[in-house]
Image (tube, helix red, strand yellow):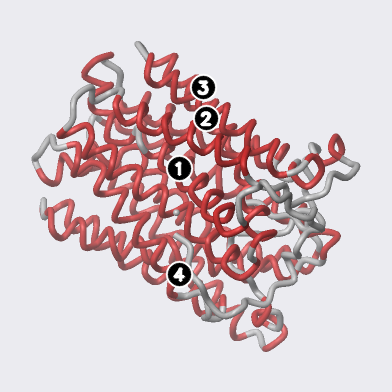
Amino acid sequence: MADTTAPPIPSPLTAPSSRRPPRPHRLPARFAFYLEASIIVGFLAASSAPTPLYRLYQGLWGFSDLTVTVVFGVYALAVLVALLTVGSLSDHVGRRPILLAALVLQGGALILFIKADGVSTLIVGRIVQGLATGLAAGAVGAGMLDLDRTRGTIANAVTPMTGTAVGGLLSGLAVQYLPAPTRLIYLVLLAVVVLQVGGVLAIAETAERRAGALASLRPRFQLPPAIRRPLAVATPALIAGWALAGFYGSLGPSLVRLVSGSDSVVLGGLALFVLAGTGALTVLAVRDITPSTVALAGTAALVVGVTATLIATAARSEFGFFAATAIAGVGFGSAIQGAIRTVLPLADAEHRAGVLSVIYVISFLALGLPAVLAGVLVVHTGSVTSTASGYGIAVIVLAAGAFVGLVRRARSGPAATRTEAAAPLLCPQQTGPGSCAL
């Protein structure tokens, strides 16, 4: 999940925070912007780096595909916990302290991965990594908006998927062609973290301290009546998109191995790279298109892409599999963006954080729990193929249901889409005065 420039995107959900005058010895704002973008790319790259390694870990420690999905699932749940509790803490204590704390946690997680000698260490590392990512997300998202609202909006939407794509591919290349396959990628990422700590110490704070830090730790779940039906329509698209990402992030390498007949870890990482990379490019491409159109196109692309993936899997077509994954990636990026951009503009400032919390819960549960269920099914049936087929059919049904719901909503009249012109990219979304979270 790359920053670009674009025409200003009007948004009621983001607002620049009050800033301190930059100190003369601090590095310039442009450097700070790219540094913060690199932090979220680095965090998400680190989160996808273990994906190509799962086959090696299984060979070393003899665990099942169910354990793989549990390792993936605990990360998603840890991110969710952090987002719901400390996601807006940087609005109260400042961006830099939160970024430094998140980087220290990330460094600790990477050290755990480097020293891992069994599944338990891997799971603990993934939990710490998830907490670090959730802690960093709000501070990075808000910090980039503080520095440049237009580019920050786009960077927040694109950099997470970019990081996910890059991490999986680079990890696969490192494992395939370089020494110390279970350690080198983490050592490189740890070196990046050390450099980023130095960068954060050298940039200026962009947010004033303010009261309410303890109160901000309490998750708020609020669904005003005007939100309930649009969210009900969007929920199947959210679940379908995130569940598909969870499947590729956990069992993708096993599926690629089945289709290609190759044990190449590069191919295992390439599947996630294609899905997330296509999703990132799609988010960038559709940023000026109305949310309902984006959501409709996205759910349709999910149906087509996942259907084609199942056909290619049955035919053992490697080219067909990756081509279909690219189509599914278009659906992944646009369905999620379109669905959420359809819902959030309907919430007023008082209820926005509560609505966003509900969306977080739906999204990250969909990312983690179906992947764990898929692991259970693989162990029970002994077949990745049958599990992938059942999983894919479920995603197709959810996406098709979302498509039908979106069509019906569009036909209900202008009132259903009256806020579309102001709908922002996700991310960011405002969780407090001048704040945002991924």
Q: CA distance from mark 2 to mark 4?
A: 28 Å
Which residue is denoted by mark 4 in the rendering?
284
- Relative to 230, is 270 above or below? above
Amino acid of disc 1: Gly
Which residue is denoted by mark 3 in the rendering?
108
Query: Is label 4 or label 3 in front?
Result: 3
Circle nearer the N terminus (1, 4): 1
Amino acid of disc 3: Gly
**Foreground of the two, 42 or 341:** 42
Instruction: Please give the label number shown on residue 42.
Output: 1
Residue 336 picture location, percent across and down:
51, 62
Give the position of the N terminus as an image quadrant.
bottom left
Circle nearer the N terminus (2, 4): 2
Q: Secondary structure at mark 1?
A: helix
**Foreground of the two, 386 or 30:** 30
* 28 displayed left or right of 195: right
Residue 139 picture location, percent across and down:
66, 46
- Relative to 181, is 278 above or below? below
Residue 324 picture location, percent across and down:
24, 62
Circle nearer the N terminus (2, 1): 1
How many numbered circles does the render carry? Answer: 4
**Looking at the image, do the residues carrying marks 4 and 3 touch, with CB atoms under 8 Å apart?**
no
Label 1 Cα neighbours within 10 Å, binned few <14 / some 14-19 / many ≥20: many
Which residue is denoted by mark 2 in the rendering?
106
User: Residue 77: in sight, yes or no?
Assistant: no
Q: Secondary structure at mark 4?
A: helix
Amino acid of disc 2: Gln
Residue positioned 39% across, 31% down in the render? 69
Circle nearer the N terminus (1, 3): 1
Q: Quadrant of residue 333?
A: bottom left
Amino acid of disc 4: Leu
